[in-house]
Amino acid sequence: MRGYFITFEGGEGAGKTSVLKEVERKLKAEGYRVTATREPGGIEIAEKIRQIILEPSHTAMDGKTEALLYAAARRQHLIEKVLPALEQGQTVLCDRFVDSSLAYQGFARGLGMDEVYQINQFAISGQMPDLTLFFDISPEVGLQRIADNVSREKNRLDLEKQQFHEKVYRAYHMLLEKFPERIYPIDAEKDLDTVTEEAYRKIVSFLR
């Protein structure tokens, strides 16, 4: 039986990476077969592309170049890690996927959500998530969390002005309206334990 593909989405500082790790632990404790991964990254080639994309000094990178690099990393990650795990019947939890490109490059960079969607359809051959959790947090709160977390890796996207992150936030809400059957919103401004529990309960309910 084919597994389920579940993605975690949200703006900077939403806490989705921490939640994903804890949800993975809880699911495995309940006997679920789980593969956790991230984008861009998850495999060697995609992690190298991640370094290029997120390197703070790469300020000259064009928006279309950025979008194409994300799509290239996504393609390799999908065929090398995600699809094989799904074929083995595992539940795949992925930190970011296509929605991130639609929000960040499509809307916030002004490339067009439809245009970026087309690029990614070529990359993923129609493999969309079965369920997406959107960790809803205002840009102000998310960016403050980043500023307060001295141990967090600062990347090129963290250096964008607040207006950019506000556009990302608007884009996610547009996607939420467009794909309500797939995207489930979670109030990410609550404490980590509360957010983790809601994410876990939603996923278990979906899997059952």
Image: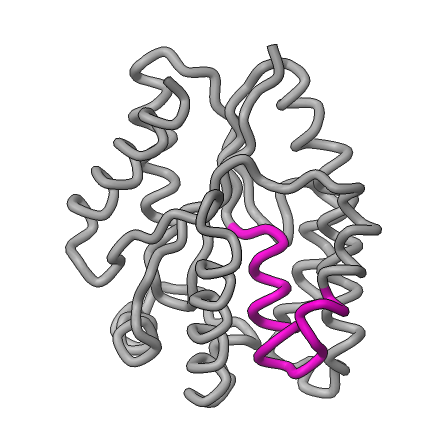
| Residue plotted at (21% across, 63% down) | 189
Give the residue displayed 70% in from the left and 76% down from the top.
112
Tally the numbered discs: 0
- As drawn, 151 above or below 164: above
Q: Quadrant of residue 14?
A: bottom left
Residue 114 relative to residue 199: left or right: right
Magenta segment boundaries in residue numbering: 96-116
Side of 123 where 33 appears, left or right: left
Query: Front-most of 182 and 49?
Result: 182
102 to 77, vertically: above or below = below
Give x and y (percent) for residue 5: 55, 33
Residue 113, magenta (yes or no): yes
| Residue at 77%, 63% in the rendered image | 69
Q: Main secondary structure of the magenta part?
A: helix
Q: Nearer the viewer, residue 57 or 1?
A: 1
Where's residue 188, x and y in %? 26, 58
